Image (tube, helix red, strand yellow):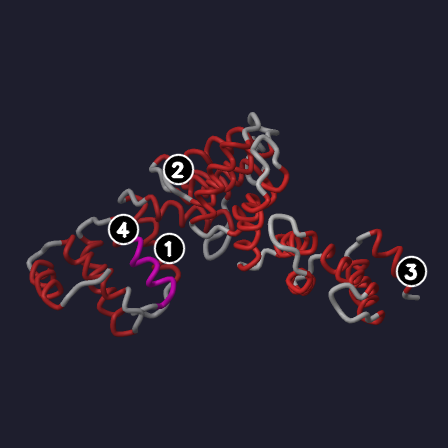
Amino acid sequence: MKLNPEQVTELTALANNGDAKAAYKLAVYNDKMNTQAGWKKAVLWYQIASDAGISGATNDLAVMYFRGQGVIRNIAKSNDLYHLASEQGSATAKYNLAKKYIAGEVLNQNIPEGLMFLKEAVKLKHRKAIHLLATYLREGQYVKKNELAAFKLYVHATKLRYRPSALWVARYLEQGEVVSKNIKSAVKIYTAMALLGEAYAQERLGILYQDGEEIEQNLEQSVRFLKMAAEQGRKRAMYLLANKYYLGEGVNKDLAQAVEWYKKSAEAGYRLAQYYLGELYASGTGVQQDFKKACEMTELAAAQGYEQAQINFQTFCQ
């Protein structure tokens, strides 16, 4: 929260005259300074706002005691404040308590209690709580597995603009195992997420535009999105982008670029990139022929269980 000196003076006057909302704004302002002096002031203002019944302030004060920011760390006090914030109606406090009870961290593990708090937070439309309950349903963790219910919750969180949930909605629509397959709808969601910088969505778009299933194949778009994902460190995208440069699909053929991306993917541990880089070293394609490096790359891929690499390593490297 950014405030100019005049605004700080005005809020301070209001807070000193009993305006709890002004006190809460001052608390957040000082908290965001990320300094010991700021945190100490934040604790004082959070306490005033909490005493006035502002649930968000109580939850934030619990965080301060948990982290030891502006106060001496006090886990018991933090837990008491989380419970108070929950009683005051804070969805975030309920979500925090859910995680603590379920994980058994700080609080003794109590899964039924944790799930109770989680469901209360879901009712209050807490996005992270909705996503977490959906994940438990998807994985069958702590609750009976129900992927259709998980999908519906992911949709709910997506409508509340929670990106991780949107990616799961797109996955389900792409796979078509739990709900009807709808590649076009998946692409629409992936595109929105990709343009917001989500690397997984960028990679999936690169693959979908390459395959052309239910959408028109577009190799140029495939390269565009694969490059976005590769530049963010997605090792599979690096490998697929290398293939594009190697074959000249959707981009001018460029062996140097192909080798560069194969190397990056191989260094990131992607076994197919390790295998094909080994093949390039063995044949001297795009690189100086080097049988030692060829075997090193092949061995790395073989160690990850890639069958053809295991065969080649046993045949040519031993």
Instruction: Look at discs 2 and 1 and give the one toward the viewer.
Output: 2
Instruction: Look at discs 3 and 2 and give the one toward the viewer.
Output: 3
Provide the residue designation for mark 4: 56
Provide the residue designation for mark 3: 314
> In this image, 120 relative to 206: left or right?
left
Provide the residue designation for mark 1: 79
> In this image, 176 relative to 194: left or right?
right
Task: Tell me residue 225's x, y (percent).
Answer: 53, 49
Name the residue rendered at 13%, 65% in the picture.
8
Instruction: Look at discs 3 and 4 and give the one toward the viewer.
Output: 3
The residue type indicated by label 4 comes to Gly
Cα separation, mark 4 vs mark 1, equals 15 Å
Q: Secondary structure at mark 3?
A: helix
For the record, the magenta segment spans 58-68
Cα separation, mark 2 vs mark 4, equals 17 Å
Q: Quadrant of the N terminus?
A: bottom left
**Magenta: main secondary structure:** helix
**In the picture shown, does residue 35 fall above or below 75?**
below
When asked about the image quadrant of residue 123, the answer is top left
Q: Earlier in the sequence, mark 2 or mark 4?
A: 4
> In this image, 234 relative to 6: left or right?
right
Task: Tell me residue 65's x, y (percent).
Answer: 34, 63
The residue type indicated by label 1 comes to Asn
When asked about the image quadrant of residue 246, the answer is bottom right
Provide the residue designation for mark 2: 122
Q: Secondary structure at mark 4?
A: helix
Task: Tell me residue 235's x, y (percent).
Answer: 63, 57
Cα separation, mark 3 vs mark 4, equals 63 Å
Q: Earlier in the sequence, mark 1 or mark 3?
A: 1
Q: Quadrant of the C terminus?
A: bottom right
Q: How dense is the environment of label 3, judged by Cα within 10 Å: few (below 14), some, or many (20 and up)?
A: some
